[in-house]
Image (spheres, helix red, strand yellow):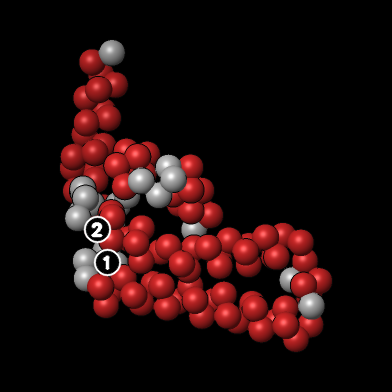
Amino acid sequence: MTELLEIWRKCSAEEEKFLDRVAVYLIPGTRISSIPHRAQYAIHWRRQYEEVHQLIFDGGSDVIGPRGFQEYKLMGDFRRWVAEILEMVADRLQPRDFEDLVKHGLDDLIHDGQAH
């Protein structure tokens, strides 16, 4: 979450810049191709954020510590952007799964390494 959000920010949320800087591989069973699928991830992060928010409301920010508070703030940003980030990468995911990565991506690396 943290790394993906930082790349997103550094690219000023510009799709082409962002997609040029990330390599994304779909874990089998991960579904992000439709709005309802992507919304489930946004809902997950919103719930995580709200759970921590309630802890802070009930006990103060010191109950989660300084690092926890930083993570909480990042969660707040990520929950706002996760659906959009997933939408951007959904159509560009290549390879589609780990077998494709091994077949195409690693073969390319091996061949490039031998060529040098």
The amino acid sitting under disc 2 is: Ala
Q: Residues within 10 Å of mark 2 (few under 14, many from 20)?
A: some
Residue 49 percent across, percent down from the top left: 57, 75
Outermost top residue:
116
Where is mark 2, residue-wise?
90
- Image point (51%, 80%), residue name: 47
Where is mark 1, residue-wise?
32
Residue 66 percent across, percent down from the top left: 76, 61
Mark 1–mark 2 CB contact (< 8 Å): yes
Q: In the rendering, which numbered label is found on residue 42?
A: none
Q: Is residue 114 above or below residue 108?
A: above
Q: Nearer the viewer, residue 108 or 33?
A: 33
Residue 97 visible in the shown view: no
Secondary element under disc 1, as helix, strand or loop, is loop
Q: Quadrant of residue 36?
A: bottom left
Q: Quadrant of residue 102?
A: top left
Per the model, the C-alpha gap separating discs 1 and 2 is 6 Å
- Image point (36%, 58%), residue name: 85
The amino acid sitting under disc 1 is: Ile
- Image point (21%, 34%), residue name: 107
Q: Residues within 10 Å of mark 1 (few under 14, many from 20)?
A: some
Outermost bottom residue:
58
Secondary element under disc 2, as helix, strand or loop, is helix
Q: Is residue 24 above or below residue 47?
A: above
Q: Is residue 98 above or below residue 55?
A: above
Residue 60 percent across, percent down from the top left: 79, 78
